[in-house]
Image (spheres, rainbow, N blue to C red):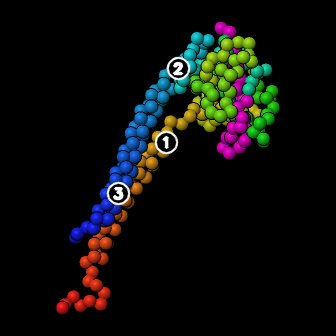
Amino acid sequence: MTLERRDVAGLVVAFVVAAGCARLGVWQLNRLGQRRAHNAVLLAARTRPPVAVSGSLDADSARDRRLLARGRYDYARERLWRPRSYEGLPGVDLVTPLRLSDGAAVLVDRGWAPSPDAYHVDQPAYREGDSAVVLGLGMRAPRARGDVDPVALQDSVPYPLLPFVIQQMPPPATPYRPRPPGLIRWPAPELSDGPHLSYAIQWFSFALIIVVGSLALLRHRGAEHRKPPIGGSGYH
């Protein structure tokens, strides 16, 4: 089969595009490996004994570690992270300063409370007592849009604020029951593989479709070239 110049050019372009798709698939597999390695580090950090929180604990040492903090809640300076949804329901997070014995304080995300407008909530109804022993996960703050930022909040409180947030975890008991009148502790963020594997499969599929489709089209064009002219007998 003799290929015309335009067929060769089209095949080269198709193979270049297919190679690009395959390269993107390999890149997604590399991202998957990196994410799994990172998740393994986070999981190992979460299984280590909890770190006692004091005013000298920095954000890097607290991040993704289980933390144990003792102190007294400052409900008067509590802040809300809004809006927040839980299983499709509107609500807010209650973020409360916990004053430590050394004079510093750390923000504690005590959990999610339902709110019809995802803005207002009866905060005194969700108080849990003044003294508290908090076991939670250390996180950099702000965690997302609307979250409380300890650095931005520092000028409005009369004590040093640690530069991270403790997300108070639910008790290990199963099943977990929210604290009345409905305060729900957030579980630790899931350590998933993310979309990288599905993206890699898509890119490899694109590459395969381009190669197979191009070869099939080329074969079809070759078969058309071999057909005798319509109305011709083929003899002279």
Left or right: 150 with respect to 211? right
Image coords of residue 143 (percent x, y):
61, 30
The residue identified by callout 2 is 60
Viewer-proximal residue among 41 and 209: 209
Mark 2 is on which residue type? Asp
Q: Quadrant of residue 62?
A: top right
Q: Residue at x 60, y 33 (%)?
A: 187
Amino acid type, residue under disc 1 in the picture: Gly
Q: What are the residue bounds of the magenta stretch?
A: 80-103
Asked if the stretch drawn in magenta spans residue 108, the answer is no
Out of 120 and 51, give the one closest to the viewer: 120
Mark 3 vs 1, N-terminal side: 3
Which residue does the image show at 68% across and 27% down from the upper left? Answer: 148
Is residue 88 within the magenta segment?
Answer: yes
Task: Give the number of marks.
Answer: 3
Decide: few, some or many residues near mark 1? Use Cα within 10 Å; few <14, some 14-19, many ≥20: few
For marks 2 and 3, give the CA distance: 48 Å
Q: Classify mark 3: helix, strand or loop.
A: helix
Q: Kindly give the residue lying farthest to the left in the view shown.
A: 236
Q: Disc 1 designates what residue?
A: 194
Q: Mark 2 or mark 1, which has the lower sequence index? A: 2
Mark 2 or 3, nearer chain start:
3
